[in-house]
Image (cartoon, helix red, strand yellow):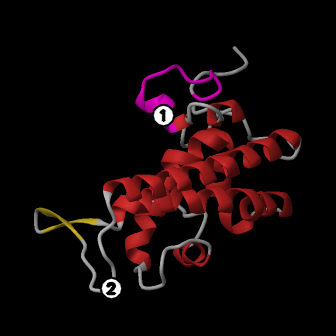
Amino acid sequence: MSVLLISAQAVKDRSRIVEAVDADVLRPTIDTAQRVHLLPILGAGLYDHLIANYSSLDSDHTTLLQTYIWPALVHFVVLEAVDDLTYRIEGGIVGMRQSDNLTNASESEINRLRDRERQRAHSEAVRLIKHIRDNTSTFTTYGKKGAVSGNIYPASELDFQGNTLEYAVRSRKPLRRYLYDDPRS
């Protein structure tokens, strides 16, 4: 597991995930949300820079992290957590976690929750992308090849309008060239 850009406690404080959820259960979900959702938004260069320098970020990168990345990341974590916190694999059996205090939500209610979190996350992602694009001289690793993550170039805010980034990947529709191809070529 790589460096987590947000703590499990911070996710709980900013979302509907309750205090009783064990941080050890939530950490892999945060890691997944970072790699699956945040990496394509930031691109490999900026993402790798944030991970490598997490403990010593300058004020501009700290502001980027706390004001723009965290709000998007929280919604992406909740989106991933819907399934991660519901289903468990224990002893070779896949099962659904049951609680005495909750009733099972219907599939349509779960899908509505996912859609709402996806919309909120994408709204925050557009805000994040616009902030970075307005300050490219500050974020010099934006749009560059990553030392660890390689050739993943940042998504455009257009990738989050109409067909969402996730939908475009799932349906195999071509994404804007910013995501996988060098935009300079």
Write down the region rendered in magenta.
166-179
Query: What residue sits 54% from the left and 41% below the top?
Result: 149
Q: Is residue 84 above or below residue 125?
A: below
Q: Is residue 39 left or right of residue 166?
A: right
Q: Is residue 40 left or right of residue 128?
A: left
User: Which residue type does callout 1 highlight?
Assistant: Tyr
Say which mark, if any, is on residue 38: none
Mark earlier in primary sequence (2, 1): 2
Q: Is residue 41 magenta?
A: no
User: Which residue type does callout 2 highlight?
Assistant: Asn
- Residue 47 position within the rendered picture, expressed as x and y whole percent measured from the top left: 63, 48
Query: What residue sits 62% from the left and 23% below the top?
Result: 176
Give the quadrant of residue 170. Answer: top left
Mark 1: which secondary structure?
helix
- Screen quadrant of the C terminus: top right
Q: Provide the residue designation for mark 2.
A: 101
Main secondary structure found in the magenta portion? loop
Say which mark, if any, is on residue 167: 1
